[in-house]
Amino acid sequence: MKLLFDQNLSPRLIEKLTDIFPNSTHVHLKGLDRATDDEVWKWAQEHGFTIVTKDADFNELSILRGFPPKIIWIRADNCTTAKIEVLIRTHYETIQQIQEDPHAGILLLQ
């Protein structure tokens, strides 16, 4: 599984999580840092990425359009990159399960 980290998350997460999510990237590295949510959505869909975000707008897009792409919505308030890394690592199995579940499109992590 490949993760696409939204602009509201640190690009350092790519390196920190490369052992469990290789080939992940950040919107900045793909020239999408100024793109609209719709453009990011389409890019993730076309390239097979799951979007990781703190932005509620992707939840709304998923409700309107369905999935893919699947969404990991980080709802933790003002947390550090290290805390987000731990959160994602802690929920690794759940993240894998949502990828395999054809009826699930959003995973909320708090």
Image: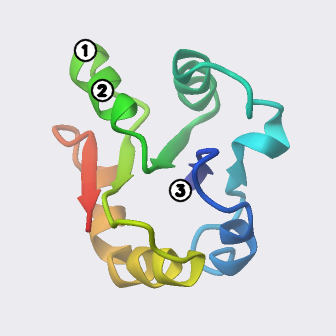
Figure check: 35 above or below 77 = above
Quadrant in the picture for residue 49: top right
Quadrant in the picture for residue 108: bottom left
Distance, label 1 to label 2, CA atoms, is 5 Å
Residue that mark 2 sits on: 62
**Callout in the foreground (3, 2):** 2
Figure check: 75 above or below 19 = above
**Where residue 53 appears, x then y in whole percent?**
47, 48
Q: Which amino acid does label 2 sit on?
A: Ser
**Where residue 55 appears, x then y in whole percent?**
42, 41
In the picture, measured across the screen, residue 87 lies left or right of residue 49, that is left
Residue depicted at 21% across the width and 23% down the height: 63
Residue that mark 1 sits on: 64
**Callout in the foreground (1, 3):** 1
As helix, strand or loop, the secondary structure at mark 3 comes to loop
Q: Which amino acid does label 3 sit on?
A: Met
Q: What residue type is labelled 1?
A: Leu
As helix, strand or loop, the secondary structure at mark 2 comes to helix
Q: Do the residues labelled 1 and 2 touch (CB within 8 Å)?
A: yes
Q: Which of marks 3 and 2 is nearer the N terminus?
A: 3
In the picture, measured across the screen, residue 90 lies left or right of residue 3, that is left
In the picture, measured across the screen, residue 6 lies left or right of residue 103, that is right
Distance, label 1 to label 3, CA atoms, is 23 Å
Q: Which of marks 1 and 3 is nearer the N terminus?
A: 3
Give 103 or 57, whichever is nearer the viewer: 57
Distance, label 3 to label 2, CA atoms, is 18 Å
Give 110 or 93, whichever is nearer the viewer: 110
As helix, strand or loop, the secondary structure at mark 1 comes to helix
Q: Residues within 10 Å of mark 1 (few under 14, many from 20)?
A: few
**Where residue 13 appears, x then y in whole percent?**
66, 69
Residue that mark 3 sits on: 1
